[in-house]
Amino acid sequence: MQRNLKTLLVLILLYNSGIHSLLAQNTGNEKLTTDSSVIPTNKQVKLANSGLNKQQKDSIWLANHIPQKATRRSALIPGWGQAYNREYWKIPLAYGVIAIPTVAYLYNNSYYKKTKFAFEARFKAQRGDSSDIAAIDPELTSLSISSLQNYRNTFRRNRDYSILWFVLAWGLQVVDATVFGHLKHFNVSNDLSLQIHPQINAFTKSPVLTMSFSLKDPARKPKNIGR
């Protein structure tokens, strides 16, 4: 009899523990389901943004806009910062400004090598070695050794200047992306106005100028600053 009671108690305990484990597992699954339903998916975000108008989308874009990103992107790739600032029309200008010194460098470097080789060949020919005369570029065969030396120096100087202008052009588009990236957060709307009025100071009885900053908002009043 006692053995039967012990067996019955053991079965009851095992049954209760099994029920508790099943209930705990179901509760955990419900929590996971609830938590996963709270987290929005990419489709839900796109659907939410699709219902916004252009002004609301621009406000969201401006809130997430970071001017430092425009600086870093322009430093890596020309025009990338302008694209980040949504100034797409500046991208061909950025590449055009950089392309000019690039083409100038290629042109001057090519003729610098040609004139340098021709000058050295003529110099060796004066010392009895004419082995390189036939390899001189046909455009330079009629030039004297002094002319070749002058052209060589000119093309080398212009090539070096081209490198300098390339660096300046690259830096210019970085500065442009940085400045206009910060200006995106500067309020330049028509709701702002500045007026200057002459007035008489009631205490000193002297004329003063008053600047009035106004916002087209009836809930706000202009701020007067006397000078």
Image (cartoon, rainbow, N blue to C red):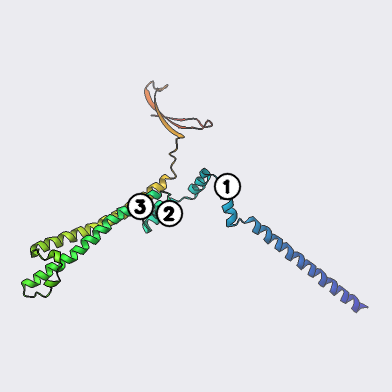
- Residue at the farthest right position: 1
Q: Give whichever of discs 1 and 3 has the lower sequence position.
A: 1
Residue drawn at the location 59% of the way across and 52% of the way down: 47
Disc 3 vs disc 2: Cβ atoms closer than 8 Å?
Answer: no
Residue drawn at the location 30% of the way across and 56% of the way down: 99
The secondary structure type at the circle numbered 1 is: loop
The secondary structure type at the circle numbered 2 is: helix
For residue 28, side relative to residue 104 (left or right) = right
Q: Position of residue 26 (x, y in %)?
A: 74, 64
- Residue at the farthest front position: 138
Q: How crowded is mark 3: few (under 14 residues within 10 Å), some or many (20 or more)?
A: few
User: What label sits on residue 107 in the rendered view?
Assistant: none
- The Cα–Cα distance between marks 1 and 3, rounded to whole angstroms, is 33 Å
The residue tagged 2 is: 69
The residue tagged 3 is: 92
- The Cα–Cα distance between marks 2 and 1, rounded to whole angstroms, is 28 Å
Q: Residues within 10 Å of mark 2 (few under 14, many from 20)?
A: some
Q: Label 2 sits on what residue type?
A: Lys
User: Is 133 situated above or below 202?
Assistant: below
